[in-house]
Image (cartoon, rainbow, N blue to C red):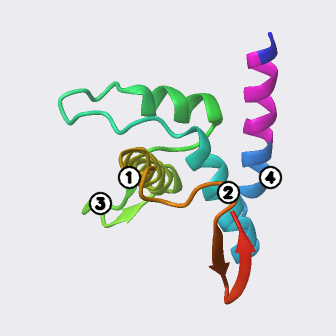
Amino acid sequence: ETDEKIVDRLRDALSEHKRCGSAEQQHDYLLLLAAVAPEKAKASDPRGWGNRVSARLGVKPGYRGKDKSRPRAFEKATATRAAFDAAVEKGKEWSSFGLQVGDAATSRGQLCTV
């Protein structure tokens, strides 16, 4: 019941942002999708999680056009999530060499603490 309510609220938020009236709304829409995007299914598995997730969220998977040159937002979000997951895995591998809590760093030219 709780999971259903969460997914329903997410679907409603996506529906509102789908109109993408501004660049910020478009960014938010893709970010919301990327947060829940499943791993890309193998080519041999046309019925992967992507189809089920996109159907539940009320968004279309795949590409526009016959030449598949224009990916839909869900495809972009899946690619974004894959890049994020890869970065997280890489961070785990290099965590002993990366920044730790309390380290000094710069962000947009300003000194900050991690």
Measure the alpha-carbon separation of dots 1 and 3: 36 Å
**Furthest-bottom residue in this view:** 109
Give the amino acid at mark 2: Tyr
Measure the alpha-carbon separation of dots 3 and 4: 26 Å
The reply to whether discs 2 and 3 touch (Cβ–Cβ < 8 Å) is: no
Q: Is residue 38 magenta?
A: no
The residue labelled by disc 2 is 29
Under circle 1, the secondary element is: loop
Residue at the spot 74% in from the left edge and 74% down from the top edge: 112
Give the amino acid at mark 3: Lys
The residue labelled by disc 3 is 68
Residue at the spot 50% in from the left edge and 52% down from the top edge: 77
**Furthest-top residue in this view:** 1
Give the amino acid at mark 4: Glu
Under circle 4, the secondary element is: helix
Q: Is residue 92 left or right of residue 10?
A: left
Chain-order first, disc 3 or disc 4: 4
The reply to whether discs 2 and 1 touch (Cβ–Cβ < 8 Å) is: no
The residue labelled by disc 4 is 16
Measure the alpha-carbon separation of dots 1 and 4: 39 Å
Residue at the spot 67% in from the left edge and 49% down from the top edge: 32
Q: Could you tell me what secondary structure mostly forms the magenta stretch?
A: helix
Measure the alpha-carbon separation of dots 2 and 1: 31 Å
Rendered position, 24 above or below 100: below
Chain-order first, disc 1 or disc 4: 4
Chain-order first, disc 2 or disc 4: 4
The residue labelled by disc 1 is 94
